[in-house]
Amino acid sequence: MVLFIFFGCNQRKSNGKYFNVVNDSLSIYFDSANDFNLSKQKRLEYILKANEVVINQDNDSLNRVNLFKVANRYYNLNYWKEYNQTVNLVLNNSERAADTVSMAKAFSYLGDYYLQKSVSDSAFLYYYKAEKVYAKLNDKIQLAKALINKAELLYRVGDLINSEKEIFNVLRIIKNEKSEVEIFYDAYNLLGLVYNGMDEYENAILYHKKALKSLDEMQIIGKSQTMAISYLNLGLVYMKLKKYKLAKDYFLKGIEQQKIDNQDLRIYALLLDNLGYSKYNLNEDDELPELFYKSLKIRDSLNFRSEIPSSKIHLSEYYSSKDDTEKSLQFAKEALFLAKKINRPREILLALKQISIVDPQNASNYTKEYIRINEELQKDERKIGEKFTRIQYDTDQIKGENTDLATKNRNLVYFFSCLTILGLFIYIIKSQKAKNRELLYKQQQQKANEDIYNLMISQQNTIEANRVQEKKRVAQELHDGVLGRMFGVRMNLEGLNQFNDDLAVSQRNDYLSELKNIEQDIREISHDLNREKSELINNFVAIVDNLFEEQRKTFPSKLISNIDSSIKWDLAVNSVKINLYRIIQESLQNINKYANATTIKVDLKKQEDSIVLVIADDGVGFNVNLKKKGIGLQNMISRAKECNGEFAIKSKKGEGTTTTVTIPLE
C-alpha cells in the first residue's frame, strides 16, 4: 500500500505583518497574482509586473517586504528558479542593511526552496540559521515557525524521533500563545503524521483530530483545502489500520471539502487514488478502476511524477485481484521503472514487493533487490541524521564567534572597511600591472638568459682551462722565442748600419731571412688562436648534445637528434644560441610533463639563410585552438620573436605535436 502525505496548505503563508504597500498599482498586481481564479499564465504576468516595480525601488524595509511578496507569488506558481533568485536578492539586501529580521525570514524561505528541491542538508542548514536568529531576537512566534519547518524536514527524511522532539519544543514555546491557532494546527497535524509513521495509530488519530478542531478557530484563505488535507491524513491512518470503511468516509469528506475552495489537483488526485484503494479493499467494485485511472490522469497531466508509481501499483493490485496477470505485471513494472528513474527508494520497494507477488517465478530476484535497496535506504537515513548533527555543530561554532548583535555589526563594519581598502589596493595594483607586466617579463627573460648563459659558460670550464694554458704557452713562445730572436736581429742590424761592405750586405740578407722565419712563426701562432676561437664557437653543439644526453638518461622516451654540420655557428649571435637552447629545453620539459610520448625527434638544420629547429613527438597532442597558452609556450614564442624569427606549433589530439622555429642568420 502506498501512502502519500501532504503537510500544510498549497498557498504559502506569509511570516508576519509588515508595512502596507503604498503604490496602489503594486497592490493590485500582488492581489491578482494570488487570485487562484485566474489562469497560471495570467497570474505570472502580474508577478512579473510587480517584480519590475519592486526591483527598481531603494533597499529599504518596504522594498524588502515587497520582494518577499514577489517570492511568495513565485512559490505559489512553482517557479522555483525565480523564487530562489528573489529570496537571495532580499537576503543580500538584508545583510547590507543589517536587517536581522529579514535575514531570518530569507533563511526560512531558502529552507522552503531546498525542501521542495529535496536537498535536505541545505534545507536543514537554512532552517537552523533562521532558528538561531529568531532565538537571539527572542521572537517566540517566528522561532516556533522555524522549528515547525525543521520538524517537517526531519519527518520527510525519516528522522521521526527528532521530528517529534522539535514539535514538542514548539508546543512548549507557544503554550501561552492561544491566538496562534495556525501554529497549533501545523504542530498537531505534523505530530499526527509522525505517529502514523511510527505506527502509533491512536496518537496519530488523536493529534489529527486536534488539528481538525483547531481549524474551527481559524480564519484563513483555503481553510476548506486545509481541512481536506486533515481528512486525507486521517483516512491514511485508518487505511494503515485496515479500517477501510472509516478511511473511505474520510476520503469522501476530503473530496467534499475540495469542492468548496479552489481545488488543489494534487490533493484531489491523492483523495481519488486512496478512495479507490479503500473501495478495492472493501470489495466495492463500483467506480473501479475508474478512480485509479482518474487520479493517474491528473498526476500524469500535471507531471506529478513522484506520485504516479502509487497509481500504477494500485492498478497492479486491482488487476491482480481480477486474475489479469499481464496487466498487473505491466503496471507493476511501469511503477518500478518510474520510481527508479526519479530515484524514489520507498516507491521502488513497494513496486518490487508488488512484482514479486505478481511474478512468483522471479520473486527471489526481486526480493534480493528489495533487501539491498532497503538496507541502502536505512544507511542513507542514518547518514542524513549524522549530516544534520554536523550542520548544527558547524553552525553553532560560527555563531559562537559572534557573541552578540553589536559585535556582529562591528565586525561587519571592520569587514567592509577592510574590503574597501583592499578593493582600492587591488585597483592601484591593476592600474600599475599593465605598465609593469612588460618590464617584469623582460626582467624574467633577462634572468633566464643569464641562467642559460651561465649554464653554457659552466659547460666550457674545461675548455677555458685549456685556453688559459694555451695562452700561457703562446705568451711564453712569443716572449722567449719570437721576441728574443727579433731583439737579436734588431741589435745586429743596428750594428751593421755602420758598414756597407759585401760582408755587411750578406749579413743583412741573413738577418732579413731570419725576420721572414719569425713572421712565419707568428702566422702559425695566429692560426692556432683562430682554431681555438672556432672550437669555442662550435662548442654550442656540444652543450646541446649534453642536454640531449641528459634527456636520454632521465626519461624513457626515445630521443632522435640531428644537428646540421653545415651551420656556421660563428655567424649566429650569442642571443640566438641562448634562445635556441632555451626553446629546446622548454619543449623537452613540456613533452616530458604532458605528452606521454614514446619518441621525440629534434632536428637543427640550415635552410637558405636561416636556422630551422623542428621538435616532433608522438604523444597525446592537444587542440591548439582551445588550449590556453601557458607561460612556457608564451616564453618560447617571445624568444623566437626576440631573434626576429617565426614560431609555429601543430598538434591534434592523439596525433602528437610538432614545433617549428625559424631564425634568420645575421
Image: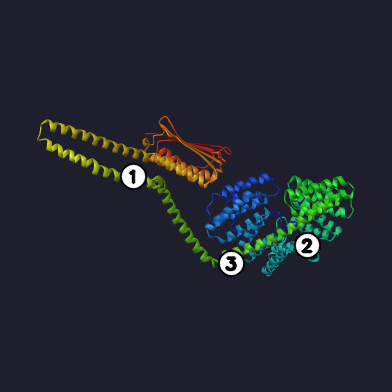
* Label 2 CA crowd tier, 10 Å (few <14, some 14–19, many 20+): many
Q: Which mark is residue 136?
A: 3
- Helix, strand or loop at label 2? It is helix
What is the three-letter code of the residue carrying label 1? Answer: Arg
Number of the front mark, 1 or 2? 1
Relative placement, left or right, of 180 versus 495 is: right
Q: Is residue 216 visible?
A: no
Q: Which of these two is toward me, 327 or 550?
A: 550
Judged by depth in the image, the label closer to the viewer, 2 or 3, is 2
Of residue 221 and residue 548, the one placed in the foreground of this image is: 548
Q: Amino acid at mark 3?
A: Lys
Marks 1 and 3, the one that precedes in the sequence: 3
Q: CA distance from mark 2 to mark 3?
A: 34 Å
Question: Residue 405: x and y, percent?
Answer: 54, 65
Residue 525 position within the rendered picture, expressed as x and y whole percent measured from the top left: 29, 38
**Circle on res. 467:** 1
Which quadrant: the C terminus?
top left
Tell which circle, 2 or 3, labels the residue nearer the N-terminal end. Answer: 3
Residue designated by label 2 = 196
Q: How many marks?
A: 3
Which circle marks residue 314 in the picture? none
The CA distance from mark 1 to mark 3 is 86 Å
Label 1 Cα neighbours within 10 Å, binned few <14 / some 14-19 / many ≥20: some
Mark 1 secondary-structure assignment: helix
State which mark lies toward you, 1 or 3. Answer: 1
Q: Residue at x 50, y 45 (%)?
A: 551
Q: Nearer the viewer, residue 286 or 306?
A: 306
**Relative side of 123 to 289, left or right:** left
Does dot 3 land on a helix, a strand or a loop?
A: helix
Q: CA distance from mark 1 to mark 2?
A: 100 Å
In the rendered view, tell whether residue 409 sits above or below residue 499: below
Task: Give the image location of residue 605, x and y in percent.
Answer: 45, 34
